[in-house]
Image (cartoon, coloured by chain):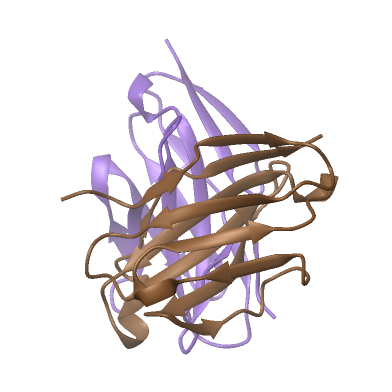
Chain colours: A purple, B brown
Amino acid sequence: AQSVTQLDSQVPVFEEAPVELRCNYSSSVSVYLFWYVQYPNQGLQLLLKYLSGSTLVKGINGFEAEFNKSQTSFHLRKPSVHISDTAEYFCAVSRGSARQLTFGSGTQLTVLP
Amino acid sequence: EAGVTQFPSHSVIEKGQTVTLRCDPISGHDNLYWYRRVMGKEIKFLLHFVKESKQDESGMPNNRFLAERTGGTYSTLKVQPAELEDSGVYFCASSQEEGQGVLEKLFFGSGTQLSVL
């Protein structure tokens, strides 16, 4: 079985500051990794994904994430956040052969003026 | 192009009642998923349709939940009878891709907030 741990349930940060949202996963096989964002009253939107290749993945809205196989992590980063980045962020994994996602419990990012 | 649409956006029912949630996927998307988030916890997989067939229903919690996808278009998820622990947000997602690519382009609806009192 695989699981996803998002270590911080709430992350407050000031506007224009950098942010890192942490995600660790457990799996004995190769995985695909995803970050989704949910803005208020909207559905989940894909931010970025790691399938193979370069371990540094760039996504939309200036976000990026780095796959670290030895530490089984896939942390999400942004060098300078905006008020509009306030949302809930979900890390998710799937095994290579699976057709379903396993999600973490989410991290609420709140950007303060 | 319309996105994944879910009805209703909110539903408040009493324990023991029946509720039916509906999902309209993006037109042409054969893959349809149901997920659920209970009480701010992780989002959990419920089941996966490919067209009208249930590809994987391993996440369905018990036999009070019944999902259908007549004609391979929209899907309904019925909870009968509803219990307090069924409260949460029910998400639907759809994808046009095949094989391993199905998760690479997955589009989610905004969810149905179900409250069982």
State which quadrant residue A3 falls in. bottom right
In percent of width and height, residue B31 lies at 37, 74
- Residue B62 on image: x %, y %: 78, 70
In the rendered view, would you say B88 is above or below A102?
above
Above or below B54: residue A47: above
Q: Is residue A73 visible?
A: yes
Q: Quadrant of residue A102?
A: bottom right
* Image x and y of residue A60, in percent: 25, 47
> Which residue is rendered at x = 43% and y = 47% of the image?
B6
Is A60 left, or right, of A64 in this rendering?
Answer: left
Residue B47, located in which quarter of the rendered image? bottom right
Residue that extends furthest to the left in the rendered view of this protein = B1
| Quadrant housing the C terminus of chain B | top right
Q: Is residue A71 visible in this depiction of the protein?
A: no
B82 sits left or right of B70 in the view: right
Coordinates of residue A100 in the picture (x, y in percent):
51, 74
Considering depth in this image, is A74 or B49 the residue closer to the camera? B49
Of residues A40 and B74, the one nearer the viewer is B74
Question: As rendered, which of A16 and A39 lies closer to the eye?
Answer: A39
**Picture residue at 27% right of the left edge, 52% below the top:** A59
